[in-house]
């Protein structure tokens, strides 16, 4: 879970990018058609994917993409 915590901004944005177009009425609109069980399964699958990606990035020694962009915006380009 530490790998997820150090990439929390990237994970939050990934959740928004995965959930919103699938569930919102302007996207696929599945939010109104999925049962509670199906919604829970979808949420669990998204959670597993983002945790697995964070763990893979941790093993590779990489930061999350959103954290890299935020650091670059705050501190400027690396020299």
Image (cartoon, helix red, strand yellow):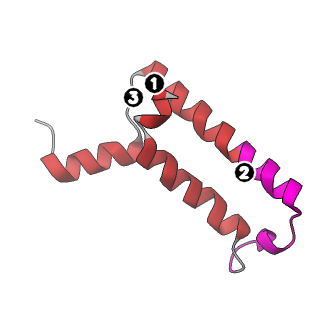
Decide if residue 70 is on the left or right side of residue 36.
left
Q: Select label 2 or label 1 by which is in front.
A: 2
Q: Are the two marked residues, 2 and 3, in contact with CB atoms closer than 8 angstroms?
A: no
Residue 73 spot, x, y in % from top left: 21, 53
Q: Quadrant of residue 60?
A: top left
Residue 45, how many percent across, how many down? 74, 43
Identify the residue at image location x=54%, y=26%.
55
Q: Residue furthest left?
A: 79
* Number of the front mark, 2 or 3: 2
- For label 3, the SS is loop
Q: Is residue 52 left or right of residue 77?
A: right
Can residue 76 be seen at all in this image of the molecule?
no
Whether residue 76 is situated above or below residue 49 in the rendered picture: below
Q: Is residue 41 visible?
A: yes
Which residues, given as a range, are shown in magenta? 26-45
Percent position of residue 15, x then y: 58, 54
Specify the farthest residue to the top.
Answer: 59
Q: Confirm or deny contact between disc 1 and disc 3 (CB under 8 A).
A: yes
Q: Is residue 33 magenta?
A: yes
> Do the residues under discs 2 and 1 have CB atoms within 8 angstroms?
no
Residue indicated by mark 3: 62
Q: Residues within 10 Å of mark 1 (few under 14, many from 20)?
A: some
Residue at disc 1, secondary structure: helix
Report the disc number at residue 58.
1
Instruction: Work out whether mark 2 precedes mark 3 in sequence or the reverse, and give the earlier one.
Output: 2
Picture coordinates of residue 52, whole percent (x, y): 61, 31
Taking the spot 88% from the left edge, 54% from the top edge, the residue there is 37
- Residue holding disc 2: 43
Residue lying at the far front in this picture: please name it. 36
């Amino acid at each position: 879970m530490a790998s997820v915590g150090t990439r929390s901004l990237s994970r939050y944005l990934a959740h928004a990018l995965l959930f919103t177009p699938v569930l919102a009425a302007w996207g696929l609109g599945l939010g109104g058609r999925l049962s509670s069980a199906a919604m829970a399964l979808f949420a669990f699958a998204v959670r597993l994917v983002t945790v697995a990606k964070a763990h893979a990035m941790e093993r590779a020694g990489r930061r999350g993409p959103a954290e890299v962009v935020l650091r670059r915006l705050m501190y400027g380009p690396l020299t």
